[in-house]
Amino acid sequence: MSSLAKELVESGIHFGQRRSNWNPRMAPYIHTTRNQVHVIDVRETIKGLLLAKRFIQKLVAEGKDVCFVGTKRQARGSIEARCGEAKMPYVTERWLGGTLTNFRTIRDRLRRLEELESLQQSGEIRNYSKKMESQLTREQKKIFRNLNGIRGMTKLPGALVAIDTGREVNALREARNLGIPTICLIDTDGNPELADIPIPGNDDSMRAIDIVVRELCVAVAEGRSQRSESAATSGDREGEGMRGDAAAETAPAGRRRSSRSQFRARGRAEDSDIGSAQRAETAPVENA
């Protein structure tokens, strides 16, 4: 057994929901039932996780970001820690309706957050009345709590990672409407049709969630390293191209001739060819 599979099994990722609380669409990912509790096939979990890692690595290498969504208590800590290190946007407090479909308004609220923070840092907020200062402080805290994780997301993400499809159904629907691929950790009571890449597993285990998020963030780091390598390679190619252009400019070039002089030269060449042909035809007659 590989180290990743061993970690997943030890974290309890294969424990599903009770048999009476399951979604029939999850039947292909269920291995067996024990004590009226479904047991998830770990092979399907590893298959989905590896597929998601390859997809994220390719996506990040192309210059796109991945947004992680996990508002349940078990997922908040790991997502904030792992995504903070990977410098990826995340939502752990509450998914605001229109975060993706009305992204312009969300960016306006983030600009408002920057304005309020500048007031706090400069001390200008003390120039307002006590009541207005209290209102502005509450507004700043509310926006920070809800949108701080995506303040660095200046454009729509290339993919969305969600923990628990039942809880994050609004986020998944918005992503589906915009054509954004979705990657989901799904328990046996979830709907795999909401995910483009399903990762069947226990979405209530903090350790299992942490392992999944950790592996996906590793793929993000690998994709970012490929992005930097490709940028360095393209920079070298551009440098070689510039050197080639400079060499072509500095190389001695022949004298350029106008189109009129070229036409005259072509005419003289044709006249000389005609004259030589006539002489060749008349030469045998003179000899005779």
Image (spheres, helix red, strand yellow):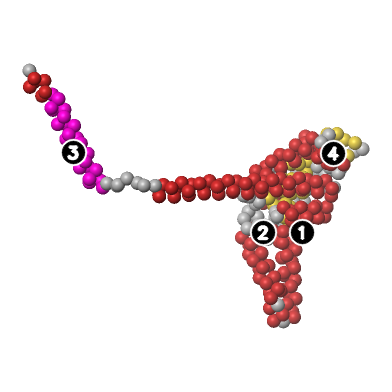
Q: For mark 4, give the secondary structure.
A: helix
Viewer-nearest residue: 267 or 285: 285
Reading the chain from its start, which is encountered first: label 1 or label 4? 4
Identify the residue at horizontal 64%, vertical 45% (top origin): 226
Instruction: Identify the residue position indicated by label 1 in the image.
Output: 93
Mark seen at residue 6? 4
Residue name at image x 78 percent, y 39 percent: 45
Mark 1 vs mark 2: which is more N-terminal? 1
Please say if 87 is above or below 284.
below
Where's residue 77, x and y in %?
Answer: 81, 55
In the figure, 110 relative to 61: above or below? below
Q: Amino acid at mark 2?
A: Gly
Count the numbered circles shown.
Answer: 4
Q: Which residues are magenta?
A: 258-281
Residue carrying label 3? 268
C-alpha span from label 1 to label 2: 16 Å
Residue 270 colored magenta? yes
Mark 4: which amino acid? Answer: Lys
- Tell me the mark number nearer the camera, choosing from 1 and 4: 4
Image vertical order of residue 41 relative to residue 258, above or below: above
Asked whether the residues under the numbered discs 1 and 2 touch, taking CB atoms below 8 Å apart as contact, a structural biologist would say no
Q: Is residue 29 left or right of residue 269?
A: right
Picture quarter with the N terminus:
top right
| Number of residues whose C-alpha sits closer than 10 Å to that of mark 3, classed few (under 14), some (14–19) or many (20 or more) | few
Q: Marks 3 and 4, Cα distance to the nearest angstrom?
A: 88 Å
Percent x, y of residue 136: 71, 73
Please tell me whether mark 1 sits on a helix, a strand or a loop: loop
Residue shown at 78% from the left, 41% from the top: 200
